[in-house]
Image (cartoon, rainbow, N blue to C red):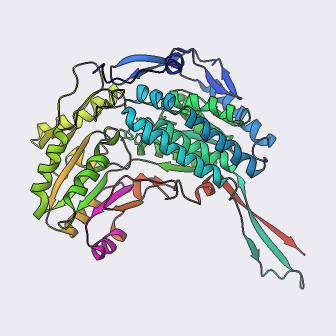
Amino acid sequence: MNQVNRVATLERVSSFLKRNHGLYIDGGWISAQSTDTLPIFDPSTGQQISTTIDANAYDVERAVTSAHKAFVSGVWSRRLPAERERILLRYADLLEQHAEELAQLETLEQGKSINVSRAFEVACTLNWMRYTAGLATKISGRTLDLSISVPEGARYTAYTRKEPVGVVAGIVPWNFPLMIGMWKVMPALAAGCSIVIKPSEITPLTLMRMAELATEAGVPAGVFNVVTGNGAVCGKTLTSHPLISKISFTGSTATGKGIARSAIDRLTRITLELGGKNPAIVLKDADPKQVVEGLMMASFLNQGQVCAASSRIYVEAPIFDQLVGDFESAVKGLSIGAGMDPTSQINAVASKAHQRKVESYLAEANALNAELIRGSAAPNNEGFYVSPTLVINPDDDLSLTRDEVFGPVVTLTRVADAEEALAKANDTEYGLTASLWTNSLSTAMDLTPRIEAGTVWVNSHTLIDANMPFGGFKQSGTGRDFGVDWLDAFTETKSVCIRH
Ligand code: TXE
């Protein structure tokens, strides 16, 4: 790494990494029964930087029991909405006060640029936290006029109330551990639920620190618990526990479906935010500068480890060659290096296993003579780097054209017209996001309803907001996060019918 540009690690961060970590249950750290541990690596060097517990079934049982006890006691669920809101706003203030610490932890365990950790992961999470805190005081039902006339002359009025669903299990992936973690914690707490959260085994540190800050903000003991561990034991025990009323999962389609299958046995409520293979349709009247800037960011932010990332770009023939040239210059100009070096634009991916997976897609494409344009070479160390890569006019049946690669890889395909682009864009089992690049309002209004995706951007891509619902069509998931109706997924609707 370029030591001159490297951000100095805060003393608070170094000492947190060295801690003898336990599990966060009942408002504090406890020793686990499990003696198994999981190493945490710095993706920029491949070196181990911390160690966490690989929780067993007994440990998970303790966390769920604590959350359930807190829930039925009413210590949080029956608290005045304004009090919950105030505590959650204080929680956001604490993140703001510890912003640099959390940003560094995020970069050290996940690999992404410190610039992205500061400006996106931490700063945007703050917006989401404050937005969601405000929802705690907006929970409301309806009054209902009824037509029941039994016995004759009786009159009835009903109303609905939204009640917290119970104990939530949050399963968090490794691409945006802090932000996606808070997308589960905040709506659960705003609605009055308790939560047991399981971060990814690769990137648990920021959420562990956020548990401490929740207690400092005033969230009562037992309401917010963190268990660290692998998916097969810790994750599975948590999501199949009978005291869990709601699962909020973000991760792969295969794991999400497995959890949903087991959830159906107990009819546990479930929200799934799964992967994407997100198309960008670029028409000949689009602004090329805007396209290249927007889609470089949308394709390579966080090394493409973004569920909403643009990974397939379809360009109308008249501007295809020019755009390929512009993308090639942009990709070759990206500097590669450690996330803690703010001048590096492409950083390591999150794990060795993921680096191998992304490289294996590229190796297959190469073996089948696909045209690859690769950016600068990765640093010569044990870090988990993948050079940013453009794949030009790949065959439709190549694995990297169909699967979610989740790396710094994007395909560019020439199409004859908007109809061919639309057919190719929709030819996928996924349906998370898409974008359309055109200066014609009528074309945009014609095409957007025909694109099979939960979010469609026009002349931008990957820009998300707390007030804009987000979720997938098709195999990209079920349910929506964000927006004014977000807490519906964390509440049950009760109808109260009164005879008078
Ligand atoms: O995902 P998993 P992986 C996609 C992306 C990536 C692929 C595989 O394409 O390459 O998924 O990543 C926990 N019960 N996305 O293997 O397995 C696990 O411990 C309960 C897209 O990491 O889905 C982790 O906390 N939990 C995505 C979380 O599930 C289980 C983000 C995600 O792991 C479990 C990440 C089980 N049986 C990957 N098995 C997005 N939508 O943003 C695993 N887990």
Q: Is residue 459 left or right of residue 414?
A: right
Q: Residue at x 37, y 70 (%)?
A: 449
Residue 188, x across and y down, in percent: 63, 46
Q: Is residue 307 magenta?
A: no
Q: Which residues are magenta?
A: 427-448
Q: Quadrant of residue 386?
A: top left
- Of residues 391 and 262, the one nearer the viewer is 391
Q: Quadrant of residue 34?
A: top right
Ligand 1: image quarter: top left
**Residue 204 in view here:** no
Q: Residue at x 47, y 17 (%)?
A: 50
User: As displayed, is residue 222 above or below residue 326?
Assistant: above
Residue 378, x across and y down, in percent: 21, 27
**Residue 472 in view here:** yes
User: As displayed, is residue 336 above or below residue 135?
Assistant: above
In the picture, which quadrant includes the N terminus? Answer: top left
Q: Is residue 299 left or right of residue 189?
A: left
- Of residues 307 and 83, the one nearer the viewer is 83
Q: Is residue 430 magenta?
A: yes
